[in-house]
Structure formats: structure tokens, C-alpha cells
Amino acid sequence: MNLNDHPTVRRVRLKTVPSIRPADESVDAGWLKQLVLEAGADDVGFVEIGRPALDDQREDILKAFPHTKTLVSFVVRMNREAVRTPARSVSNTEFHHSGEEVNHVAREVVQALEDRGIRAMNPAMGFPMEMHRFPNKIWVVSHKPVAVAAGLGMMGIHRNVIHEKFGNFILLGTILVGAEVSESSRPINYNPCLECKLCVAACPVGAISPDGSFNFTSCYTHNYREFMGGFTDWVEQVADSSSARDYRGRVSDSESASMWQSLSYGANYKAAYCLAVCPAGEDVIGPFLADRKAHLDQVVRPLQEREETVYVTQNSDAEDHVTKRFPHKTIKHVGNSLRPNSIDAFLNGMPNVFQPGKSAGLNATYHFTFTGHEQRQVTVVIQQQKISVKEGHVGQPDLRVTADSQTWVGFLRAERNMVWALVRRKIRLAGPPKLLLAFGKCFPSAGGRQERVELEPRPSRLRGEPAAFVKNDPATGEVRWRGKLTLSEVVDEAHEVKTFRFTPPAGGELPFNYLPGQFVTLHIAPGGVPTKRSYTIASSPTWSDRIEITVKREGQGLVSRWLHDELGVGDEVEVEAPNGTFFFSGQEAGRVVLIGGGVGITPLMSAVRYLAETCWPGEVHLVLGFRSPRDFIFREELAALQARHPNLAVTVTMSAPGDEPWSGRVGRIDAALLASAVPNLAAQQVHVCGPLPMMDAIIAALGSLGVPPAQIKREAFGTVKRSPSGKETTSTEIAGRALFLASGVTAPVPVDATILDAADTAGVPIDNACRSGTCASCRVKLVSGRVTMAAEDALTDQDRAEGYILACQAKIQGDVEVDA
């Protein structure tokens, strides 16, 4: 029979609605959204397949469903109390039921689309996955980045998506649709994550770091003990046991019963405490805001104090964390099946199994050359407790490793002996062997099978580090950017003062916006010491392709000396931006007085440049104080700006000009100078920036001239007189004890130590950068007790009213309780 004569073909061709919708016909976004919501979803968004956010998974998506033009992302809410309870059987029931609901919603939507002739496919919410790829990538689509791109939330510090309304008490689903949608969704412009660090405090294995980094293998080994990796290890324990008695010596009766339960009713999550304790989200945050201590007592502490077995790889960061933070929990050494079956799997998985804590003090470059079955050249750099993997040989190596690929894989799987491999010259070293030993400590062995198994290598898929958690800018409430910028130019401005210009590595516009007067934080490691330091952006926000920081070289300044002496044009620096509330954009007042001393001119210069370039009509009075003419920063540019803009008045004084030529004012900035330079000063908005002693004197002078405190904004500037680690305490006398409520840790505080010093010593995570009271990164809430602070300019009046302090400045007077 001719195909055209077949009854099915004839009936289809008689239909008015085609069985397959034309590929160029779009679907109405409103109709599709309503369809998904009616199917049971709680929120939904759409992402086109060409969105850059999908670059790293587009190929895999199209392999699974070549017709994909749009990804439909949706969320299903979970019941919060079921997730929070220490009775984890209840939590696992909630996870399983909600997951089934996600799959049901997706299937119902796909069915409705197919009825309208629209091709669609629904990958599973979780399992089943493509297990033939294990231990490489087994999922069809990564739901989290799709959800973020679809505007359904942002990634929290705990690496879960936080919905702006429902918080992290959601599960995600994705539907691949073979048609364009009339309107795509966009990411939300802020991160709902509160940065409260409760997830850091609750995680039993320390997988979550305060800075947003994530130890994948710690989480995977414990929380997913009864999933694929832990199950594989359990099977090997069964296989290796010589008798029932031997097996019971390896696996307890409760562990065997728990594995049976997972096999029968769905795999159990061992923890997921990060989800349980998170208070973010409009529908979730109310009780937390009403009584934070009750949230800690009723939600966080029961999980912290829960007696349980914690599964770790021996000699891992997780083992160290449990030993230090949770001594009442039982540690059990296990494997996790994260054993590479090829060189590609080894390289691809290295960032996931890397243990930052075990790499402390190691700064080395390794050149690997693999021969035989898989021939590759790769550079691995371990520095500042971070790892990078690059194709080819890059830079000067500290150790060269040449290895037969199959021998190396066998060594990694504990199936080949390193001594044997070196004797047989299957592995050859050029450089200090101790560096190979140090390398191995960064990747604790997961244990190997007893028999050698040959597996086919897979195509290379080198990936970078997972996307970092992003913070919000306190001034705008929008997401703060973090990434690499390249030093493109260095300009000498004045005596021991240089301007450093940074641009995007690939050129083009900056990946973030900022307000004039805000600052950036550099994440660097001068001398191998991981350090964060904040510098004001001196450039104007109108310069969209670059930022500039202007820095004075201080004799004892660790970072300023590194910038001046070591950082070179072409070097990349990790930057977090923007931050800070000391800004003036012209919207805050109709005229402004800007007063600065020394390098404290930088935030004021950003404002002056911005106001000049945007032709702001208000009056700007810039009053500056320097020690001598050679210290006058931006001298020529300010003269040119004043000549072009009649509403800009610049007054400069030198405190000690000496023999240098200077015809201007001499002396410090005082009440007399301010009164003569600025008419009607008492009615002006005033911004003051400079060293603390100078600012105290100027603010006193402003007060004597009738300027109300509410009209004065200030920001301290100056060298950090502390070591980067902050641990300079020498006294043995104890001022009191600090109870860190979120972490459940009590620590003694010496009389010459700050709360941040005590937190560092006790292992309590408090974010920090400048350690001089300027950046407010260490802002925490003082729940009870009294402290004194040498500097608190970074705190707003509202911060003070609500009990916030700067941990880097706060010295206690008796016992205190801190929300950290």
C-alpha cells in the first residue's frame, strides 16, 4: 500500500489542526503560563534556548530534544515545617511527594502541548537520570540555572535557588518546548538570600563557606549517602565482606535498614539542613524577623544538636569540620564512588573533589602530560586554596608529571601502586616529589575496588568552577557582581599615589553598574596570604568600559604595596562590586559640599566627575586638604573641571607645604576655612571622607557652624593597621565571652581583641574585607551586651537603632551575644 493511501495518513490530512505545529509559529506566553499554573505549578517563567545563561548546557539539551526553542521553568512549593523537622523521614517524604508533583505538572503540560501540535519533552525533576554516563554528567537539564534565567529566584549561598516569595522551599521543573514563546522572562534584579549564614552554621560537613564557595564532595558524600555513589560503596562493602559477621562490622544494622528503606521508598537525603534553616523569602521571613532567637532555638539548633552518623572521606575537609564543630556526631569513613574512569573524568571532576583546607600553604603549578590511550597536556594550578585546570601547558611549572593514561587512572582508583609505576617509568616526575604528595592530599582517596576494571574514556568536558553565590549591593538592592577584571593601565597621580585602571578581560562594557562614591572589593593573595581589601571607585559611572581606583602606597600597607610594586598591566584581579552607601548622584539634594583629606578624595572625585559629565545644575563645593603640593591628587584635572563648570568651586589647603611652591591656603580644614569657602553652609548636604582624626575635627567644626548631623555623611579612609588575618591580640586577660547565636559557639575575647578576632579564632564565619570599619562587610547584630568601637562610620543611623555593630571594631565590655 502506498503510504498516502494508509487510513491513518488520510485521517490526519483531513484534520483542521495539524498534528505538528509549524516551527516558526510562536506560543502565547500568557496562555502557556496559565496552562502551567493550572497544572499545579506555583510560579513559572520562560527562557529562549539561545540565552547566554544556557551556553554550558545548550548542546546537551539539543541532543536530548533537538526541537527545543524554549525552556519552561516552574516551581512547586514544599511544606516548610516538614522540611525543617529533625525527623528526617518526614522531610524525605516531603521531598519525594513534591518531586512527584513536579513530574506530574510537567507531564500534564507536555500532554496539553502535544494535543495542540506543539512538540515538548519533560526531563525528570530529579531521578531517573542518564546513569550510563555516571560518574560524569547524568542529568538532561540543569534546573537551577534555568530557573534563575527565568526569573524564579537567585542562587543562595547554599547553592539552592531562593524564590523571592516562597524562599528555598521549592522544587524545580523544566519543560523543553519545540516552539518560541511570545515573551521571555528575565532574571530578578536582586538576590533574596539574606546572607545570614545559617546554612553555613547548620551544615554538618562544612560544605558551604561564608564566601559562597562550595565543597561538592563533602555534601555529596554525606547528604547523598544512599544515592548512586554511596550505594556503590555499600555494594562494595557487601562484596568485600567475608562473612555476615564481617559485614556487620562494616555496616551497622540501622544503616542496612536505612538502605533498604531508600531502595523501597525512595533515596533518603541525610541532611539538607541548608534548606531547612533558610529564612529567606517574603512568605517565609516573618517569624524570623519577629524573633530571630526563637528561629535559632526552634529550627537551627535541633539540627545542629541532632545525634547522627556523618559520612566523610578520610582525611577530608569534612572530617576536620565535624571533629571541630560537631564532636557529638559520629564520624564514619566511607567511599563516595567519585573515582575517575578516564583522564577526562579526572580533569573534569577535579574541581569537585578538591579540598581547599588540605591545600593550605600549597602554591604550585603542575604540568601533566598523559600518553598512551588518552593523550593530553594539561596545566593544574593550586594557589590560595583554589584550583584551576587549563588545557595545554601554561606558565612555568613547579612539577612536571608524565604518565601513561591508564596507569594514572589506575593509581587514582587505588588499583595501581605509585612506587611500581615510578619504577616501571609508567609515571615520571621532573621536580620535587613532595609536590606530588602535596597534590595528593588535596584529593583524599575515596577507596578503590579490589579488581581492576577497564572503562572506555569519554570526551573531554573541562568546566570551570560552579557559579558563585552573588550578594546584593546595599545601596540599590540589586545583585552584586563578582568576577575577573584586567589591569589595563597604571597612572602616576601624585607622590606615592597611583591610579589603577581595570577593564573587562574581553573588552566591552563593565558587567556591573555603580553609583558615584561606591567601592569595590579585591579578592587577592599578596605574598600567598588570601586577603580582601576595599577601594573606592574614583572613576565616573558614565565611563562604562572601565573602573579606576586611586591608591596611596603605605609603608605598612600589605595590599597597597602589592598593587604598587607587584601587580602588572595585563594581570587579572578578582573583583566584587559594587558596595557602599557613601555616594552622591545628584538625586539626594539640590547642592552638595564634598570635604576630603588626602586619598579620601577618591569617592568625592567620582561624584565630581559624574556630576560634571551629566551637567548637573546644582552647586558643588569641593574642599580638600593635603599635606603638601606633591600630595595633591588630580590637581590638573580639577583645574580643568573648574574652568569648564562654573557651578564647581574647589578650595584646597596644605597643612605642611614646606619649601614646595604653593600660593594657596595653608593650614588644616577648620571652621574658619569652611565658613569662608562655603556660603550658607548650615543648609547644605555635606559629605566628608578622610582619615579618622581629620574627620572628627571637621565634623566638630561643622557642628559649630550649625550643620545638623542628619545632613552629614561620612566615610573613614586610611591604612589598615592590622595584619590581614586580623590576629594581633597579645593580652591573656579576658574581657568576657561572646556567644555566637547562629553558630552555637561560645568563645573568650581578650581585652585587646575584637569580636571578629574571636570569631576567627573560634572558626565562626563572619564576612570581612577592610578590617578598619570602612566597608561594613562585617556588620552583625548585637543581641545583648555592650561594646565599644573605634570607628563605626560604615553604620547607618538605622543600623545603630537596630543594634548592628562592626565586628572588626567591636571590643566587648562583659559577656555579649552576637547574631553570627
Image (cartoon, helix red, strand yellow):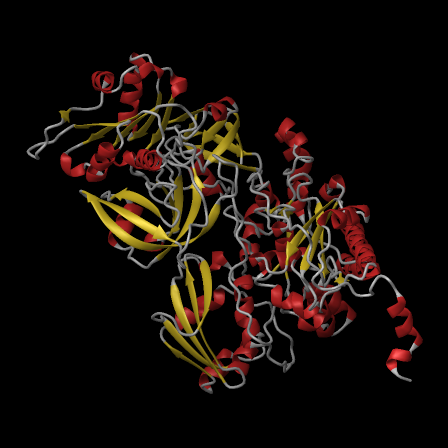
Looking at the image, which is closer to me, 145 or 395?
145
Q: Is residue 711 left or right of residue 46?
A: left
Residue at point 69% right, 62% down? 24
Looking at the image, which is closer to me, 300 or 686?
686
| Picture quadrant of residue 506 | bottom left
- Count of all numbered marks drawn on residues in the image: 0
User: In which quadrant will I find the N terminus?
Assistant: bottom right
Height in image: 807 above or below 134? above
Height in image: 158 above or below 427? above
| Picture quadrant of residue 706 | top left
Height in image: 725 above or below 707? below
Residue at point 52% right, 30% down? 781
Return the residue found at the far right.
7
Looking at the image, which is closer to me, 349 or 409?
349
Q: Is residue 391 left or right of residue 649?
A: right
Return the residue found at the far left.
659
Whether residue 311 is visible: no
Q: Residue 487's x, y, as percent?
A: 33, 54
Residue at point 67% right, 61% down? 69
Q: Residue 299's x, y, as percent?
A: 68, 37
Q: Residue 796's x, y, as percent?
A: 45, 26
Whether residue 233 is visible: yes
Q: Is residue 112 left or right of residue 412?
A: right
Q: Residue 751's x, y, as percent?
A: 39, 30
